[in-house]
Image (cartoon, helix red, strand yellow):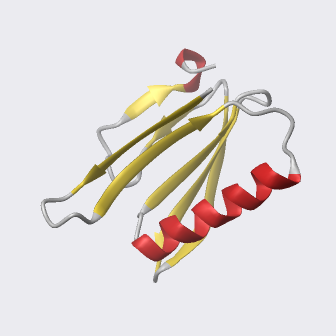
Amino acid sequence: MHYLRSGKDPGGRLLWSARFDHRNPITPYVKKRSNQKYEVYEESGVREYWIVFPKEEIVQTYVLVNSKFNRGEAFVKSDQIRSIIFPDLLFSLEDVF
């Protein structure tokens, strides 16, 4: 299953992107595509990037600092997660997994 949503500002700049991809196991192709998307998001100035691992019930976050992604926190099913760029976006991962 693959689901992609994104939002852009009036000038066409990518503001946010949400990608849900339920592919198991991680194959070399999937890993290569994930790395390419990571680079595109970084180059495009996406300020926050989450990778969801549904089988492991983990969300790994990345935050753009000085045009480079820094690994943020990793969250598990029992955690609440809050967006860095949308601080009002707060939810329990128990509602996700």
Q: Quick one: which residue is furthest to the front in this view?
A: 29
The structure residue drawn at horizontal position 87% and vertical position 54%, both measured from the top left corner, is 28
Compared across the picture, whether 61 is left or right of 86 comes to right
Residue 13 picture location, percent across and down = 27, 66
Residue 48 picture location, percent across and down = 46, 58
Compared across the picture, whether 12 is left or right of 37 comes to left
Residues 25 and 56: in front is: 25
**The C terminus is located in which quarter?**
top right
Is residue 42 placed above or below 14 in the rendered structure?
A: below
The structure residue drawn at horizontal position 76% and vertical position 49%, both measured from the top left corner, is 30
Compared across the picture, whether 24 is left or right of 41 comes to right
The part of the image, by quadrant, that contains residue 9 is bottom left
Q: How many marks?
A: 0
Residues 79 and 27: in front is: 27
Residues 48 and 35: in front is: 35
Residue 20 picture location, percent across and down = 57, 35
The structure residue drawn at horizontal position 72% and vertical position 28%, both measured from the top left corner, is 57
The structure residue drawn at horizontal position 49% and vertical position 65%, both measured from the top left corner, is 41
Compared across the picture, whether 7 is left or right of 68 comes to left
Is residue 14 placed above or below 52 in the rendered structure?
A: below
**The N terminus is located in which quarter?**
top right
Residue 38 picture location, percent across and down = 60, 63
Q: Quick one: which residue is furthest to the bottom in this view?
A: 66
The part of the image, by quadrant, that contains residue 8 is bottom left
The part of the image, by quadrant, that contains residue 34 is bottom right
Is residue 19 placed above or below 80 in the rendered structure?
A: below
